[in-house]
Image (cartoon, coloured by chain):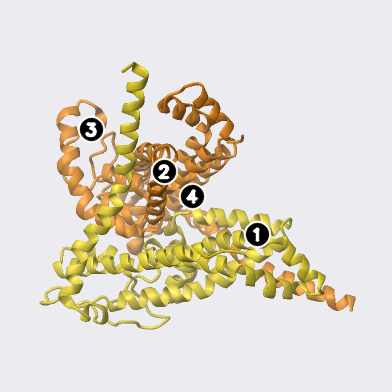
Amino acid sequence: MKARRSFHDILVFYTLALPAFIIILILASLLLSQLGLSIPIFSVQGLGTYMKTVWKPMYEPPPHGAYYGLLPAIWGTLVSSVIAVLLALMFTISLVVFMEEIAPKHVKEAFSTIIDLMAGLPTVLYGIWGLAFLGPLLYKNVMNSIYTYFNFIPMFSCEPLSGATVFTAGVLLSIMITPFTVALVQESYRSIPYTYKEAAWSLGMTRYEYVKLNLSMITPSIVSAILLGFGRASSETAAVTLVVGNAMNIGTCIFVPAYTISSLIANQFAEAQDFPYMLNALFAGGLILLVIGLIVNTLGVFMLRRVRF
Amino acid sequence: MDVRTLKDRVFTVVVVLVAFMAILPVFHIIAYITWKGLPVILDNGISFFIEIPAPVVAERPGGIAPAIAGTLFMTLTATIIAVPLATLAAIFSVEFPNHVLTRAVRVTSRSLLEIATILIGMLVFILVVLPLGRFTALAGALALAIVMIPYVYTYVELALLSVPKTYIEAAYAIGMRRAQVIFYVTLRIARRGIARGATIAITKAIGETAPLLFTAFGARSIIFGGLLEPADALPLMIFQFIQTPYDNWRALAWGGAFTLLILYITVFVFARVMVKEVKY
């Protein structure tokens, strides 16, 4: 009887362990394929793959014929994600303060439902709206006026030519990541002990002073939301590809069409097999995307753990 | 009015305005897609859902049947792969909480949630598309399954952890074996939570574009070619057709966007109703 029982336990263990192992294997093979398939491009171009701005697919292999420098795409990813995070931070803090401190209960509930709806909305729908509506709107009403009045600032120093720019991508991304950052900040805000809040009110603070105090107590979670939001923004593909303009540009101005790493992969992966080393260059792009994600997510989770009451 | 009160008033007004500004886009997106997409469907009637896209010069745009068939087929196949796999892995984490594999699968699931889904497309391209020598619906379904796994795992694990320990102890006390406890007690009690996890994962899968770009690739000359042929999907069709200069195809993209929106809202409402009913 005892032997059969342990056989039963072993069977249960392996039936359950196998799927867990398969899932780990999927991630391991993803990491290995990104790493392994980017090695060839590094062996011919070295770190120039990440440092150079030339993107020249040709049949003659690099470094003498073709050249695959990813710097413009990396730059585009960073710029669009920074714009997204800054705007999302403004939205996030306002939404959290509004929902937690100002809105009546039923308004608050309506807001949470809407934010949940935003969080799962297929990204291609954000993209098609960004392409047809948001891009032209920003071009006509925002970018042109900023350019006219602030063109002495390097960031705004180039004349926008259409709505498909890295700035548009940043604005669209900020809308898309807001539900995610709201969830992070709201959870911390709610975890502030009620005694602290009562003490603040009893001192006769105004709502502004009270909110400022509360936010200062959860600063690590706001930093964490910035980092994790950045991770989300940098990995988004479909919506960004539709609005970012898809051109190899690098510079301080944000009113130019650009590439992000993911939009570069989305646009060029299918043809990449025709050119030697081009597929490897795109895998090197995937690799840097993984590295960026690893850094911001590790730091973000670390910061989130620092909120303790 | 002193300075403190003034600051407070200005702050409150700014916060309320920005909060409303932040949620305004989603209403505009829904309205705009309805405004652009609904007329396309009304103009073409049932043929919009049962025909293949017409040539770009044709008088009518045709329909999006390949996209609907592909989305349904690939999402269903992905669900059949991802839900059992992730559910069993989640049971493992709950049954053996201190095992090294549990820690590894938790980290894996968190990482898969954060990874750009286009990288999943690249992986499936290398592992499935290159060896088979062609883009296939199977590759698309596998990519979607990988997208779904971390969502199913996370929600099922939560559901399993919320099963009251007293029920499980009672089951062991009457002499049930581990497998019996898992299947007759834990899974039965947690079934709504599991269904909710699966539903959330499905909403993700029906909206994904990036992992399908070079796995399913898109095929529009027949409605559905089979498991080993390229396939279309709603997000893929929208993504590709909206970037073309042809009015017919752009009309199909808008009609498809409206269809996807309705599909998403339906599943979203379904998932909400299910949450409200979870009670032990």
Confirm whether circles 1 and 2 share one chain.
no
Total marks drawn? 4
Q: Is residue A158 above or below residue A274?
A: above
Left or right, B203 with respect to B251, comes to right
Q: Quadrant of the C terminus of chain B?
A: bottom right
Give the Cα distance between marks 1 and 2: 45 Å
- Is residue A246 visible in this depiction of the protein? no
Confirm whether circles 4 and 1 share one chain.
no
Sequence-earlier tag: 3 or 4: 3
- Quarter of the image holding residue A101? top left
Q: Amino acid at mark 3?
A: Phe
- Residue A290: give its label: 4
Mark 3 vs mark 1: in front: 1
Residue at the location (48% across, 54% down)? B115
Give the Cα distance between marks 4 and 1: 31 Å
- Residue B165: x and y in percent read 72, 61
Q: Which residue is mark 3?
A: A156
Q: Which residue is mark 2?
A: A50
Q: Is residue B41 above or below residue B18?
A: below
Give the Cα distance between marks 3 and 4: 30 Å
- Residue B219: x and y in percent read 31, 76
